[in-house]
């Protein structure tokens, strides 16, 4: 035990240390050794306040012998249990998660350490708030503990997707001296804008907490064979702050949480610590998917952290087709933890997949984020009817400014779907207003963030607006491409505290709340989620407007009786701008 080890291993910890083994093959990154096996050990490690966290250490091995040479280490911090028994009684391990690529890193000369956050899994402690400063400092302490171990060369990286990716950025904001590089996928940069975009909660972070039985299914650490310590640890989890209630009771960015006693949105927003994140010298690689709400945050973080960014097709934490995430991370970590020239940093900073584009070459690379240098084409909302509208053929999209008229609809709160955790909103055009273009005369590629402008009023002193950009096939089937949401009280745009890619930004601060007078029309400006999508020839572009969304978990709480009536004023103030290269042309043959 070295003199720098402030958090020593408990005396009862079991560590498997065998004789050293040579490597088996040269790896694809141009150096290092390939190892065919690994050895695992687990134990409790106390952090600065004495709380014991469950830690699993995986070390490369070959021929039954663990590597004794000090190696760099990849650290993963999870609330989802490093190891647990599944419903069939088999052991499931985070180290095997395909989106993390950890086995690949082990095989190429990296140690892997996976720890349960306090208050979850097999760790002791009470979780005060998801990804709070306590949790971030716990990660800081574990990284410095890792750097002090004889099997570590002192260089540590972090990786993770979803919560795990967010944990990596939170820990990085505490600037552990030994942390050199971070891979963060499908996570947030501005927690308020992510969870409560536009001032309205969505699905992320708002579902009910798991029962304690989930944590009790964790695999006990090695020196706890009968699970007595596990049961003792999980008993402490009963005092965790409730996550859904934590988020749902803070309507404003500057709300003081009654659970934590802090302005919690700012405490857990990575952007709050932007100076620390950028001044630390830590390298960042971020990735996500187009059909996933965090991707908007990925581009914010990418630009503010000077990170490399990859976005592919698909849903939450889905590795893009043809991408070996293990090898991609290997090149990144080899460069920043092993000092090898892999060429990763020399590549363009942004790489994204164009949906429905060239099947042979769907990837685009650039040193600027998608859509930055593109012109915008405006399509105006028009209609031919007034009064309550129920048909999916309500209105049209056109390049011409239409005559002013008002369309109204009652908010339909019966929008629930069978999917409990919908990462992408369903197409429910019958629940509101729609504006549809004629068929496209040629393919149009939309790249970046569409922006919608609307003039809206409510018959009540409230109003939540949901907007969706869709592609409609010739047979009428629609696909949701991008979306956003905004509460009428949060309609003022202000200067953001970080680079928001030139998009409209709504603060959500209590000091910026504006009154909503029934019947008064208000102009709104909303940036939709980013996309890179070819709207195909013969297909149509549609914008849908609703007053409720199935991803609102508190839909019963916001249901009104009588239902709220929303009105959209059509004309020069209601339109969508699409970032495209060139123009948009519609077919004159419009059935």
Image (cartoon, rainbow, N blue to C red):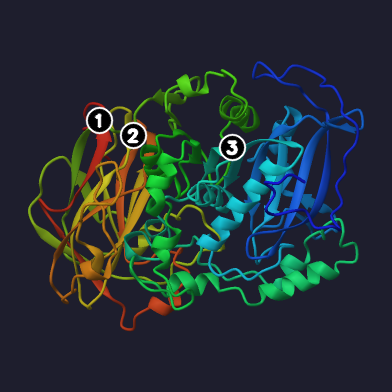
**First along the sequence among labels 1 and 2:** 1
Tell me the crowding category of disc 2: few under 14, some 14 to 19, or many 20 or more residues within 10 angstroms, Cα based: many
What residue occupies the far bottom of the structure in this picture?
561
Judging by the rendered image, the residue that carries numbered circle 3 is 319
Q: Position of residue 450 (x, y in %)?
A: 29, 43
* Front-most of residues 252 and 358: 252
Tag 1 near tag 2, CB within 8 Å: yes
Regarding residue 422, the answer to whether it shows in the image is: yes
Tell me the crowding category of disc 1: few under 14, some 14 to 19, or many 20 or more residues within 10 angstroms, Cα based: some
Tag 1 near tag 3, CB within 8 Å: no
**First along the sequence among labels 3 and 2:** 3
**Marks 3/2: CA–CA distance:** 21 Å
Question: Residue at coordinates 52% horizontally, 18% vertically from top-left?
Answer: 343
Tag 3 near tag 2, CB within 8 Å: no
Q: Position of residue 219 (x, y in %)?
A: 81, 59
Regarding residue 479, the answer to whether it shows in the image is: no
Residue 447 is labelled as 2
Q: Position of residue 279 (x, y in %)?
A: 41, 40
* Front-most of residues 84 and 459: 84
Residue 374 is labelled as 1
């Amino acid at each position: 035990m070295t003199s720098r080890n402030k958090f020593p291993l408990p005396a009862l910890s079991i560590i498997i240390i065998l004789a050293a083994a040579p490597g088996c093959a040269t790896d694809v990154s141009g150096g290092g050794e390939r190892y065919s096996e690994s050895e695992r050990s687990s134990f409790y490690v106390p952090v600065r306040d004495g709380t014991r966290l469950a830690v699993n250490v995986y070390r490369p091995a070959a021929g039954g012998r663990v590597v004794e040479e000090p190696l760099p280490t990849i650290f993963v911090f999870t609330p989802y249990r490093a190891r647990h028994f599944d419903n069939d009684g088999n052991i499931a391990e985070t180290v095997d998660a395909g989106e993390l690529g950890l086995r690949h890193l082990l095989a190429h000369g990296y140690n892997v350490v996976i720890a349960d956050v306090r208050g979850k899994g097999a760790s002791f402690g009470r979780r005060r708030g998801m990804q709070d400063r306590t949790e971030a400092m716990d990660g800081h302490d574990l990284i410095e503990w890792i750097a002090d171990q004889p099997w570590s060369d002192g260089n540590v990286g972090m990786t993770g997707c979803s919560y795990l990716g967010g944990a990596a950025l939170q820990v990085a904001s505490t600037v552990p001296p030994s942390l050199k590089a971070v891979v963060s996928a499908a996570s947030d940069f501005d927690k308020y804008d992510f969870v409560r975009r536009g001032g309205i909660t969505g699905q992320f972070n708002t579902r009910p907490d798991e029962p304690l039985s989930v944590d009790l299914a964790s695999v006990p650490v090695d020196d706890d064979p009968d699970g007595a310590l596990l049961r003792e640890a999980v008993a402490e989890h009963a005092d965790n702050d409730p996550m859904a209630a934590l988020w749902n009771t803070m309507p404003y960015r500057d709300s003081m949480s009654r659970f934590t006693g802090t302005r919690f949105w700012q405490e857990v927003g990575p952007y709050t610590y932007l100076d620390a994140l950028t001044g630390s010298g830590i390298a960042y690689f971020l990735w996500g998917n187009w059909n996933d709400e965090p991707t908007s945050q990925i581009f914010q973080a990418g630009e503010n952290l000077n990170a490399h960014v990859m976005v592919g097709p698909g849903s939450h934490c889905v590795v893009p087709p043809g991408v070996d995430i293990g090898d991609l991370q290997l090149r990144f970590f080899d460069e920043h933890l092993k000092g090898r020239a892999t060429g990763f940093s020399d590549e363009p900073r942004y790489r994204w997949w164009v949906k429905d584009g060239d099947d042979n070459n769907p990837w685009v690379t650039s040193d600027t984020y998608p859509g930055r240098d593109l012109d915008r084409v405006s399509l105006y909302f028009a209609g031919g009817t007034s009064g309550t509208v129920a048909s999916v053929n309500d209105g049209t999209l056109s390049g011409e400014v239409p005559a002013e008229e008002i369309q109204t609809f009652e908010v339909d709160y019966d929008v629930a779907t069978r999917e409990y955790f919908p990462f992408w909103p369903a197409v429910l055009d019958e629940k509101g207003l729609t504006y549809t273009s004629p068929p496209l005369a040629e393919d149009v590629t939309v790249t970046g963030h569409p922006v919608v402008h609307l003039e809206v009023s409510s018959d009540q002193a409230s109003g939540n607006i949901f907007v969706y950009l869709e592609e409609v096939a010739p047979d009428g089937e629609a696909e949701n491409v991008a979306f956003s949401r905004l509460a009428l009280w949060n309609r003022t745009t202000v200067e953001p505290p970080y680079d928001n890619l030139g998009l409209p930004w709504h603060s959500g601060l209590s000091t910026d709340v504006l009154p909503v007078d029934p019947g008064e029309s208000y102009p709104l400006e909303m940036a939709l989620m980013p996309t890179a999508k070819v709207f195909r020839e013969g297909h149509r572009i549609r914008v849908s407007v609703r007053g409720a969304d199935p991803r609102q978990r508190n839909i019963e709480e916001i249901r009104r009786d009588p239902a709220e009536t929303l009105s959209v004023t059509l004309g020069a103030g209601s339109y969508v701008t699409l970032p495209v290269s060139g123009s948009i042309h519609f077919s004159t043959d419009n059935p």
